[in-house]
Amino acid sequence: MGEQAVEDIAENPIEKPGANTAHRVLYDGQCEICQGCVSWLKALDRENKTICLPISVEVLSAVDSRLQMDECLRQLHVVTPTSEIHVGWDAVACLARLFPSTWLIGALGQRFPFRSAGRFFYGFVAKNRYSLSKCRGGACRVAKPEAVRRKAKLGAFWSCYTLGFFIRVPLVLWAGIKAAGQRANIFARTYHKRLDLPNGKLTILFLNGMLPNTVPLLFGELFTAIIYDGIAIDPGSPKMRWSLARHLRQVKPKITKVVATHAHEEHVGNLNWLAEVTGAPVYVSEMTARFLTPFKRLPWVRATIIGQPPDLKQPYHLLGETIDTESGYLQVIETPGHCDDHIALYDPKEKVLLAGDAFMGSYFATPNPDVDSRKWLVSLERLMELDIEILVEGHGHIHTLRTDIPDFPGVVIREDPKVAISQKLAYMRWLREQIEAGFQEGLPVRVIEASCFPWGRRTSWESCATDECIRLLSLGHFSRTELVRSFVRTDGEQLPTVYEVRISGGE
């Protein structure tokens, strides 16, 4: 997905422009209700009248020396530009008066009897704050973690988490509508199109098919085949074959080899066909060859939409450490994680990384059930050692700052590829910490999943509608739950038959 960077609500009160002229809002960064309210505050605040700061010792000392940790943990604190401190319900009313749409609430909230009612309700919530949420990565890390964990109950956690979600429902729906429009726009601009990049070495063919087209429209995942310096990479599934043939008739590229980065159906379904049409030999890794001979039966949803690939036919060749191209060579880099057999291809001369699905956006949240995120972390660390100027994802997105790469909104992303990889590494390391801590505490998987998608992160609620739609339509094969399982999965774990061979490495 072309996903927006994670927006942690934490901001630096010292470095933030206009910090001295804004209301600084000190809130509990682990409370889902607080996070929900802060999301609305950010949506209302189009003129940057506020700065939202989750509580920590460093933040409190930087904002105002009068702020005390225990008091701030009990209830909301707002420090005005004139250094006045408003607490609890009075802080809520102060913030409400800043915006035209909520001004009346703030004005009435300062008068009897509304002020008394507001203080009573807010005081009740503040008094029972430790019972309202299971401590999972916020205030409990800066004060009294053991006390919070002893008092917090899972029933209260779900109440708090659910309320936080319903506070955000309008924002979630609006984000879903905007994302759907963006996906439709990108799909329309890439339909039957190709993208030619520097020196004619790199061509990206956008593939289509009647049923496969539902995927980019619903979820934003484009289907592509890549031709790099005479090598055709990941030529799509059988249901995209007519689209690939159409491109080949128009472009008439010289193809000397056909390569697959891994054995997923949208990457390998046309290997044999393309080899027969072009006379080019097929190259795959040894593990990919095992997965494709024979290819396991796909779940019916994936087989219906994407298409069941045929078994790989002889003759084919096994990839070594490098593979020759028309004018040079590509390094073959083992990058397990997305699946056990994954490889990436790297041109050290042009500094181009053909990543396949080893990189799928910095915050990809609904993986396939054969992901092993611990292996993926190691693979991403390996990729960080490369000198990369152009990163090409297996589903069409390109990350680069090079000016010789033409603009293509929604496809070409103007960012340093190493920065994109480092963001994904940081996100996955944070996930690993959350998930390992959750299992050590003996929490249920659903609770751990919720803690990995707190409503305080924009990527959690902005992608919520799309992620849950993916879960529903794939019958659970792609979901946020699989992301949690991917950090604790073992080779001996029994999964649906189609995935067993991938998890065990074919043994």
Image (spheres, rainbow, N blue to C red):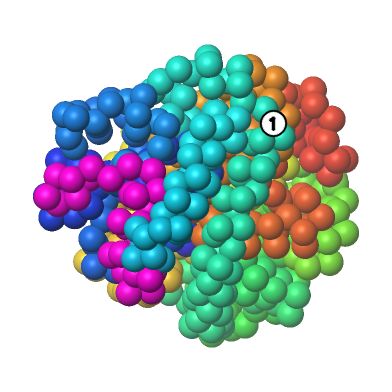
Q: Tell me which corner region of the image, top left, top right, bottom left or bottom right, holds residue 485.
A: top right
Give percent across and percent down for residue 481: 69, 42
Q: Which residue is nearer to you in this view: 188 or 437?
A: 437
Tell me the quarter of the image containing the C terminus: top right
Q: Is residue 171 left or right of residue 494?
A: left
Q: What stretch is highlighted in magenta?
A: 79-104
Residue name at image x 77 percent, y 62 percent: 473
- The percent coordinates of residue 65 (x first, y second) are 16, 29
Q: Residue 180's quadrant in the figure?
A: bottom right
Q: Is residue 92 magenta?
A: yes
Q: Residue at x 69, y 31 (%)?
A: 154
Compared to residue 494, the image places residue 191 above or below, namely below
Q: What kind of element bears circle 1?
A: helix
Q: Position of residue 199 (x, y in %)?
A: 31, 68
Q: Which amino acid does label 1 sit on?
A: Leu
Dot 1 crowding, Cα within 10 Å, few <14, some 14–19, many 20+: some
The percent coordinates of residue 181 (x first, y second) are: 53, 79
Residue 47 in sight in this render:
yes
Mark 1, residue position: 154
Query: From this viewpoint, is residue 360 visible?
Result: no
Please give the name of the residue rendered at 62% of the width and 74% of the height, measured from the top-left corner: 217
In screen coordinates, is 483 left or right of 124? right
Above or below, 77 relative to 366: above
